[in-house]
Amino acid sequence: MSADTIEHNRNRFDFSGVDSIWLFGYGSLIYKVDFPFLEKRPATIHGWQRRFWQASHDHRGTPEAPGRVVTLIAEPGATCMGMAYRVSPKVFEHLDVREKNGYLRFTTTMTFDNGSHAEGLVYIATESNDAFLGHAPDADIARQIKFAAGPSGPNAEYLLRLAESLRALGDDCPHTFAIESHLRSVTESDT
Ligand code: SIN
């Protein structure tokens, strides 16, 4: 599948008759909230883990030197914390452009802090998209992130702000924190 998912997403979900819908964010959607929302609540989804396995050619890297950003990988028993936003369906016109580099909207069940549940949407870049990179050692991912930057800024900022937001949410994401720790020890001579 081509990495540009705008058209795929437009045809994926029928919003007719829907006034508002929950969106679950687990990456930059936690800390870069450039869209209006009606309500915001920390939430968890089950059966998914956050991984820096997706290339960013348009935000935190370039086609020549892609950055690495997060996607979700199915893993039985895993949980992923994030932020849920109740939004108007109109918001997806903006978000589908923002998340166009390989992310498709999927429906998911999210669990709020008080144990209640809601159905909503989540952007996932599956391994069938052209920008999917997959597993690499944490130190290699950190090195790639350290030296990548794109129109939205340095890739390192994406990682550091995500790690900070996850701590604020009380999430323990060993994958993100391990890459963050490697990033701090990467030096210019590692290019
Ligand atoms: C998300 O944050 O939910 C999707 C991935 C990203 O935009 O970083």
Image (spheres, rainbow, N blue to C red):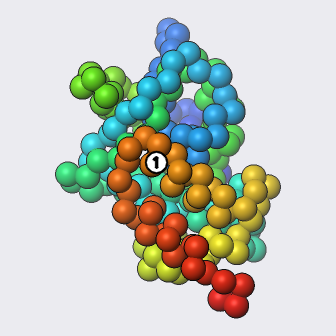
The relative height of residue 145 versus residue 158 in the rendered view (above or below) is below
Tell me the residue at 26%/52% (across/down).
78
- The residue wearing badge 1 is 166
The relative height of residue 16 versus residue 135 in the rendered view (above or below) is above
The relative height of residue 137 versus residue 41 in the rendered view (above or below) is below
Tell me the residue at 45%/61% (across/down).
176
Side of 142 where 83 appears, left or right:
left
Side of 40 where 79 appears, left or right:
left
Under mark 1, the amino acid is Leu
Image location of residue 80, percent across then percent down: 35, 47
Image location of residue 170, percent across then percent down: 38, 44
Please rate how many residues cluster around mark 1, counting C-alpha atoms within 10 Å: few if below 14, some from 14 to 19, many from 20.
many
Q: Residue furthest right?
A: 151
Image location of residue 75, percent across then percent down: 27, 56
Side of 154 where 113 appears, left or right:
left
The picture quadrant where one finds residue 137 is bottom left
Q: Secondary structure at mark 1?
A: helix
